[in-house]
Image (cartoon, rainbow, N blue to C red):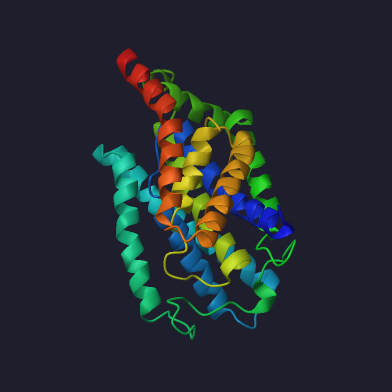
Amino acid sequence: MTAYDFGNILNFASFYMVAGTGAAISMKAGEFNLGGEGQIYAGGFCAAVILAKMAGFPAGVAVPLALAGGALVSAILCFLSALLRKYRGASFLLTSFIISSAVIPLINGLIAGPFRGNTGNLLATPFIQKSFRFARILPPSSLNISFFAGIVICILGWAFLFKTKLGQKTCIFGISREFALYSGFSEKAVTFTSALDGGALHGLCGAFIVGGTYYTCHSGFYIGIGWTGLTAAMLAGANPLFVIPSSIFLGVVTTFINSFTLHHNVGYDLGAIIQAIIMFIVAIPFLKFRGRNNAGN
């Protein structure tokens, strides 16, 4: 394995750690967020636009604003699903997927239209200036400092779920919503907080990708990342600490697939097939658990 491959493995892992922690928080609350791809896309697009508009500003001002903007817009998208879940009884799983599916073509249209930069044939926003780009590690790989931010986010996600009262209540809701309600826990606090946290982390993932890997928001950069982040969370049993090794494992899988398809003239659909098989295998225990939960209720 070359330093280039090793760096790319860790870089992919950084995507999956941030998105996987967001997915894990939703799963601990008893919900599945299937809108990760759209939320990552929205967060990356918002961050790219903010950084493009703030050219000439100090990086210490522009970058935090872009990260916050990316996290905020995706948190709102996920919050809409929580509102529908709470007040209309709609399935969080379905609404998160539907909202994501609606947002993706909207962003594609904005990138192809008013927000397109001078990037030749690439459908993308303008490239961000060099002072806004995250420091690279192990060049020419794409590994950057967002990898360490991903580890910190996993640790903070674990601390929130298992070391705070609200996090522990979130876990209890995920195990038995009826028991939590009878115990007097606030459903609004758990539902809205987990949705906001999960959405914000997916948006932050998109912002990290723009700031550290592509330096622009190009059409389709999100593809596969949201689903793989969800797979990382499922492999980790929805424990953010275990999302770290599961993300590295999936980073190895992604890097190997990309290398294999490039050097052996194999269609990129192979990667989607392998990832789908992995997700199917790891989903079985969760489906069994939810089935026993529903039978008990």
Residue 13 lies, with reference to residue 57, above or below; the image says above
Q: Is residue 65 visible?
A: no
Marker count (numbered): 0
What quarter of the picture does the C terminus occupy?
top left
Is 252 situated left or right of 191 in this image?
right
Q: Position of residue 217 (x, y in %)?
A: 49, 70
Residue shown at 38% from the left, 81% from the top: 114
Residue shown at 45% from the left, 44% from the top: 274
In the picture as drawn, the residue positioned furthest to the front comes out as 264
Snapshot quadrant of residue 195: top left
Snapshot quadrant of residue 266: bottom left
Residue shown at 40% from the left, 46% from the top: 273
Q: Position of residue 32 (x, y in %)?
A: 40, 38
Residue 73 lies, with reference to residue 33, above or below; the image says below
Is 81 situated left or right of 281 in this image?
left
Q: Position of residue 68 (x, y in %)?
A: 56, 61
Is 73 situated left or right of 255 in this image?
left
Query: In this orientation, which residue lies closer to the viewer: 90 or 241?
Result: 241
Residue shown at 40% from the left, 18% from the top: 179
Query: In this orientation, which residue lies closer to the viewer: 57 or 100?
Result: 100
Q: Position of residue 158 (x, y in %)?
A: 62, 35
Q: Is residue 266 visible?
A: yes
Residue 78 lies, with reference to residue 188, above or below; the image says below
Query: In this orientation, which residue lies closer to the viewer: 251 or 47?
Result: 251
